Amino acid sequence: MTQSPHEDLHRDRLKRSQATRRDHAVRGTERLSRLADAGPKASKPSIATQSAPLSEPDEMLRPASYRLPPSATTPQVSVPISPMLQVVFGLVVLGMVVLLGGVALGSNWGVLRAFISGRLSSALLSNEVRVTPRVSATPNLAVSAGAAPANQKRVGIVSGHRGNDSGSVCADGYTEAELVYQVSVAVASQLRARGYAVDILDEFDTRLDGYASSVFISIHADSCTYYNDLLTGFKVARSELSAVPAIEDKLVACLRDRYGKSTGLKWNSNTITHDMTNYHAFRKIAPQTPAVIIELGFLNLDRETLQKRTNKVIEGVLDGILCFAAPN
Ligand SMILES: [Zn+2]
């Protein structure tokens, strides 16, 4: 059976003599770097391609036949416009029409593209091109679905082991991954109801590279194997190489306080390991993102709380995040 990264974490603690500890991150499948944004770069067409010369053609551009003879005394009235000049004026007018049309359509490249390809009407009727007013009396209501407001706080939640393994497994099949996913989904739902944007991430999610958010939390639980009566309680840790230690310490303190109060579980600092403080995701996400890893409790001695009173577990994690993200 494949040991989980998490099982190692506990096994190390208990079997210090075991020299071949495998690192949580090293064992993890190294992910390919996030794919560069392969989408076509939408660039606005340059003005120069749209607008013909806007200024009047000067004398040098005028065909010789247009020039008046030196002796002419009635220059403008009776002179016929040459075909060449008509072409020049036509280009000027066309350029201005295109330019003004582009401005009127809000400089929306999708609209312009549709316009150019003659699909303007159908595009505007479909969802393919959405024209939104630049100015709205009710800006909060103008935000379309899927587009987060600029000031919306984002929370990243790693559902421990998800997409990789089951984590700690109990004899009857109950797994760490099952518990923490239930908690992750519920916490995410509660946060979204409060206006947060939330990403539920896999253990080795490709989105981890450079991930930026207001709060980042990886949720795990400890071993379901009984070793001794000391293996009970929860713990929270930040990176030992934190770029924002004071901020992350606040997040740790918030979770420690709220989660402890909600669940009644003890704080177990004795089993915070290097694998927690050197957690692989800490080294992948954006350095400024406040990040912690929480062990909700031990699946063996704390199972009653974790499995039967999961609502308290959820509430504790949620309150801990809110304590940090939205302090009163
Ligand atoms: Zn784990």
Image (spheres, rainbow, N blue to C red):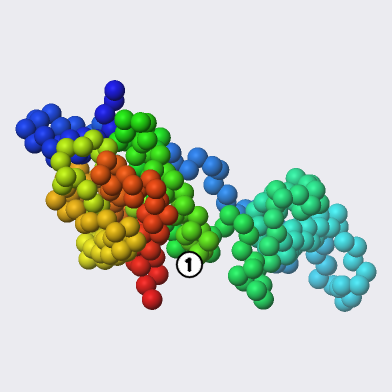
Q: What percent of the width, then of the height, locates residue 41?
A: 54, 47
Q: Position of residue 266 (x, y in %)?
A: 23, 56
Residue on which disc 1 sits: 151
Residue 72 x/y as whole percent: 86, 72
Whether residue 161 is visible? no
292 and 109: which is toward the camera: 292
Label 1 crowding class (10 Å Cα cut-off): few <14, some 14-19, many 20+?
few
Q: Is residue 137 above or below residue 317?
A: below
Q: Is residue 11 visible?
A: yes
Q: Residue furthest top?
A: 1
Residue extending furthest right? Answer: 78
The residue shown at (50%, 55%) is 189
Q: Seen in the image, is 220 located left or right of residue 196?
A: left
In the image: residue 42, left or right of residue 37: right
In percent of width and height, residue 322 lies at 39, 65
Question: Quarter of the image containing the N terminus?
Answer: top left
